[in-house]
């Protein structure tokens, strides 16, 4: 459990944490495959939006 010491309403189950990590990993892999390694910083906003949407 992520944030196990947080109040119950704020706890993030490990399955959701894994899903978030997997999604961010896919964004990074796609950028690498598209030869956009120099633009990885552009993934910050989409990754943050994903975290906020799930968490």
Image: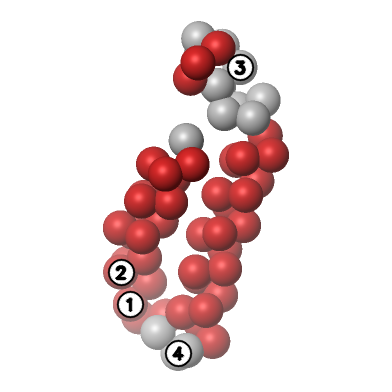
| Number of marks in the rendered image | 4
Q: Residue at x 48, y 19 (%)?
A: 10
Where in the figure is residue 54, as x and y percent of width and height? 48, 41
Q: Residue at x 49, y 69 (%)?
A: 27
Using the rendered view, name the quadrant where residue 5 is placed: top right
Q: Are marks 2 and 1 in contact (CB under 8 Å)?
A: yes
Badge 1 element = helix
Where in the figure is residue 17, as x and y percent of width and height? 60, 40
Where in the figure is residue 1, as x and y percent of width and height? 67, 25
Badge 3 element = loop
Q: Which residue is denoted by mark 3 in the rendering?
A: 4
Disc 4 to disc 3, how far (Cα)? 38 Å
Mark 1 neighbour class, 10 Å CA radius: few under 14, some 14 to 19, many 20 or more: few
Disc 2 to disc 3, how far (Cα)? 31 Å
Using the rendered view, name the quadrant where residue 45 is placed: bottom left
Mark 3 neighbour class, 10 Å CA radius: few under 14, some 14 to 19, many 20 or more: few
Please tell me which of labels 2 and 4 falls first in the chain: 4
Q: Which mark is residue 22?
A: none
Is residue 41 shown left or right of residue 26? left
Relative to 19, does residue 30 appear above or below in the rendering?
Answer: below
Q: Which residue is denoted by mark 2 in the rendering?
A: 42
Disc 2 to disc 4, how far (Cα)? 13 Å
Q: Which mark is residue 35?
A: 4
Q: Which residue is denoted by mark 1 in the rendering?
A: 39
């Amino acid at each position: 459990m992520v944030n196990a010491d947080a109040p119950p309403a704020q706890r993030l189950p490990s399955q959701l944490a894994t899903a978030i990590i997997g999604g961010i990993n896919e964004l990074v892999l796609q950028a690498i495959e598209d030869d956009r390694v120099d633009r990885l910083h552009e993934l910050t906003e989409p990754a943050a939006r994903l975290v906020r949407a799930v968490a």
